[in-house]
């Protein structure tokens, strides 16, 4: 499901989907936090896939002139956080995503993109 959303998110979403992530969700967290406007949450089926997805997203976005402010967790591959300022991308190894349940923690956020349905 894709709702109306900021078209600038498309480049981030497409970069993640190109690496066959599962369960991609984009949340509009404006008004709920000051750290970002949007969270993109997705999963990989292995630690290696999570690391590869993060690396691909970073390279793909760099081609579009978009550089991260910071990246955390890429070596471990359990939960990678890529901070692009107004967009924060969370890439999880699936069991870790279930454990931390960011979608549940941010239940009040508007779900603007959902590839779970």
Image (tube, helix red, strand yellow):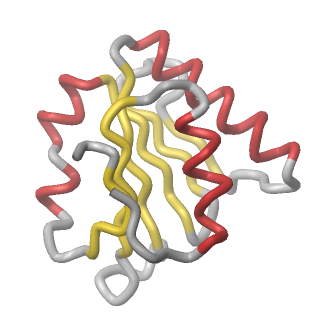
Q: Is residue 69 above or below residue 99?
A: below
Name which residue lies at 55% across and 38% down: 16
Along the horizontal axis of the image, is 83 left or right of 34? right
Residue positioned 25% across, 25% down in the render: 94
Report the residue at 53% width, 26% height from top.
74
Q: Which residue is painted at 67% across and 54% down in the image?
A: 11
Quadrant in the rendering for residue 14? top right
111 with respect to 55 (left or right): left
Where is residue 84? Give x, y as percent: 63, 59
**In x, y percent, where is residue 72?**
52, 38
Residue 96 or 25: which is nearer the viewer?
25
Residue 55 horizontal side relative to residue 102, left or right: right
Count of numbered labels shown in the rendering: 0
Residue 47 quadrant = top left
The image position of residue 27, as x and y in percent, is 35, 66
Does residue 17 appear left or right of residue 12 in this picture?
A: left
**Horizontal and vertical percent for residue 41?**
37, 47
Identify whether 16 is placed above or below 1.
above
Against 49, residue 37 (above or below) is below
| Residue most extreme to the bottom | 31
């Amino acid at each position: 499901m894709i709702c109306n959303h900021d078209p600038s998110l498309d480049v981030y979403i497409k970069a993640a989907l190109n690496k066959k992530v599962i369960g991609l969700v984009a949340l509009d967290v404006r008004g709920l936090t000051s750290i970002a406007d949007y969270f993109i949450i997705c999963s990989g089926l292995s630690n290696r896939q999570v690391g590869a997805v993060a690396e691909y997203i970073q390279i793909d976005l760099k081609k579009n002139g978009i550089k991260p402010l910071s990246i955390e967790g890429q070596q471990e591959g359990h939960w990678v956080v890529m901070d692009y300022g107004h967009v924060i991308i969370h890439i999880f190894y699936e069991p870790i995503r279930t454990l931390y349940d960011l979608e549940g923690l941010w239940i009040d956020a508007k779900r603007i993109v959902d590839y779970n349905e």
